[in-house]
């Protein structure tokens, strides 16, 4: 690809892919690679800059991840973030220690505005700290450029070698002017031109798919959601009729969605197959109440259906999936904890009848997936379709999943989404849906006592789906939706609105 390249070396921190996203948002192409890359391998990539990510290890511990010391001799600018800054200090002759007072969360920091990273900024900034250790002695050639009450070297630099270290996280939204600091490093220190666009990235992905797949045939789980739709568009451009799209109607879709998906894709230049498997999935889910068990069962059934359809088609070599980066993190990639498994990255049985998995969106966040979809020419009604989990309404129907409960939830969810759209909020609220709780409560309708379900409404705003805030939907919109649901949908007599952010909650309830 004819553009500049920034290398992000991964030391196991929770924000590593977010760093890459921030760099790409600034028009600079980057990739995340493991810290084990040798200096020779790094040089072969010809980066204009290198970013060391954070991590949960202790830099001076013998078993902690280390960068190849020869990397420091390549003459390439380096930005170390959190653990990356500590590691740089440790490897270049400084020292790292554990302070008496740790720092987590928003922290007041005083900076030196003469630093190229802080040029034009006020001396007092609020930054996001998340560290146990800190740099207590600078390596030779370095000077401190920022401090906090408990961290003497919240930032450091060696301008002669173009090495910079930040104890805080500039990539997160909580750090004041953090993106401006990263922009300074990329453009003023590394000489970035901002020559990368989603159009160039889409061409790179197409080339990667062609290289991976060759002349093989690919089977895609096409749900009609944003992720799988973008994968379908990408693969169709990359490999044409080598692609077969299997739409598994598992009976857990939103109202009328199965027919909408078929109408949207059956006329395209794709091999489109619809499998009506509702009875099969509901049979497997009978009596199951545990959320993880539901996810695993649905994931297994997806794979089984794909295997069966692949055998009918014959000679299918690859399974394509719309896995995006938040899925990978929450399913426990690397050292990350398992928050909840996703059907496209978890729940795979031991025996899968495919050569490999094709996941072209694996390093993209949701907003980047939408941008890619627009670049590929997908219509807005697909690109901006409401996010929908692979397990479908099964994880929005708490407790055991039955056809009766699904019918109730479909109708209520449809009304809620319709009222959000009528209010013109469907673009500003990034995800919104209804959840049928397993709780019943007493109510009164027509002077008669009722004992029916409680329905929860959920709405969140987010930039990357890694964190999310609850949406401040106007009361009149919620009131109208609630009144319609109670009056038009049977077996619901109480509506609640979820005001939990992520964290501590997740966007979905299960």
Image: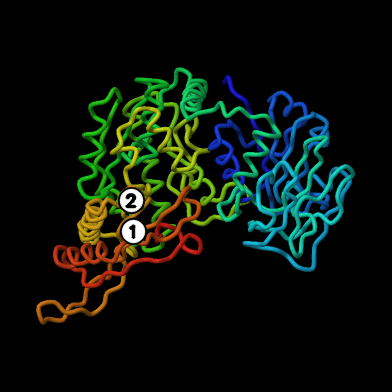
**Number of residue marks:** 2
Residue 188 drawn at (x, y percent): 68, 34
As rendered, which of 196 and 301 lies closer to the eye?
196
Which residue is labeled 1 in the image?
Answer: 396
Task: Specify the quadrant of the image occupied by residue 443.
Answer: bottom left
* The quarter of the displayed image where residue 239 is located: top left
Q: Residue furthest left?
A: 446
Residue 208 location in percent, x, y?
52, 24
Instruction: Please name the colour scheme applied to the rendered image.
Output: rainbow
- Density class for disc 2 (Cα within 10 Å; few <14, some 14-19, many ≥20) is some
Residue 158 vs residue 332, the one in the foreground: 158
Q: Residue 430, how many percent across, how many down?
A: 38, 50
Rendered-image quadrant of the N terminus: top right
Looking at the image, is 308 positioned above or below residue 145? above
Outermost residue toward the top in this view? 215
Tell me the element at label 2. Answer: helix
Which mark, residue 392? 2
Between 258 and 156, which is closer to the camera in this rendering?
A: 156
Is 267 left or right of 334, judged from the image as shown?
A: left
Q: Is residue 248 above or below residue 467?
A: above
């Amino acid at each position: 690809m004819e553009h500049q390249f920034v290398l992000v070396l991964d030391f196991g921190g929770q924000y590593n892919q977010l760093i890459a996203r921030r760099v790409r948002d600034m028009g600079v192409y980057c990739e995340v690679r493991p810290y084990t890359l040798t200096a020779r391998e790094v040089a072969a990539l010809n980066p204009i800059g290198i970013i060391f990510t954070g991590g949960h290890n202790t830099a001076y511990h013998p078993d902690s991840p280390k960068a190849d010391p020869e990397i420091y001799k390549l003459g390439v600018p380096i930005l170390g973030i959190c653990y990356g800054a500590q590691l740089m200090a440790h490897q270049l002759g400084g020292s790292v220690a554990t302070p008496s007072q740790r720092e987590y969360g928003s922290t007041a920091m005083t900076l030196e505005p003469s630093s190229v990273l802080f040029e034009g900024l006020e001396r007092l900034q609020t930054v996001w700290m998340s560290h146990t250790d800190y740099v207590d002695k600078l390596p030779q050639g370095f000077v401190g450029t920022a401090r906090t009450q408990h961290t003497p070297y919240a930032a450091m630099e060696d301008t002669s070698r173009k090495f910079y270290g930040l104890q805080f996280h500039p990539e997160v939204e909580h750090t004041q002017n953090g993106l401006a600091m990263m922009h300074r490093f990329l453009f003023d220190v590394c000489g970035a031109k901002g020559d990368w666009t989603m159009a160039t990235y889409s061409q790179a992905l197409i080339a990667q798919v062609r290289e991976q797949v060759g002349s093989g045939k690919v089977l895609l789980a096409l749900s009609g959601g944003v992720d799988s739709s973008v994968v379908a568009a990408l693969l169709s451009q990359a490999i044409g009729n080598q692609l077969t799209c299997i739409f598994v109607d598992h009976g857990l879709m939103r109202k009328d969605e199965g027919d909408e998906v078929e109408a949207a894709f059956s006329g395209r230049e794709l091999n489109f197959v619809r499998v009506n498997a509702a009875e099969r999935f509901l049979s497997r889910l009978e009596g199951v109440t545990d959320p993880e068990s539901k996810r695993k069962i649905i994931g297994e059934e997806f794979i089984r259906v794909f295997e069966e359809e692949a055998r009918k088609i014959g000679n299918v070599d690859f399974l394509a999936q719309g896995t995006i980066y938040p899925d990978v993190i929450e399913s426990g990639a690397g050292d990350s904890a398992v928050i909840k498994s996703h059907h496209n990255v978890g729940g795979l049985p031991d025996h899968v009848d495919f050569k490999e998995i094709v996941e072209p969106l694996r390093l993209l966040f949701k907003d980047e997936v939408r941008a890619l979809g627009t670049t590929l020419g997908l219509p807005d009604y697909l690109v901006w379709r409401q996010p929908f989990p692979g397990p479908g309404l099964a994880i929005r129907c708490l407790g055991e999943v039955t056809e009766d409960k699904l019918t109730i939830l479909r109708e209520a969810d449809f009304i809620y989404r319709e009222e959000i759209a009528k209010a013109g909020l469907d673009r500003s609220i990034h995800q919104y849906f209804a959840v049928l709780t397993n709780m019943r409560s007493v109510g009164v309708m027509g002077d008669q006592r009722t004992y029916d379900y409680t329905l929860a409404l959920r709405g969140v705003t987010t930039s990357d789906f890694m964190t999310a805030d609850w949406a401040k939907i106007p009361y009149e919109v919620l009131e109208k939706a609630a009144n319609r649901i109670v009056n038009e949908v049977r077996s619901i007599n109480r509506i609640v609105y979820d005001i939990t952010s992520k964290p501590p909650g997740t966007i979905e309830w299960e």
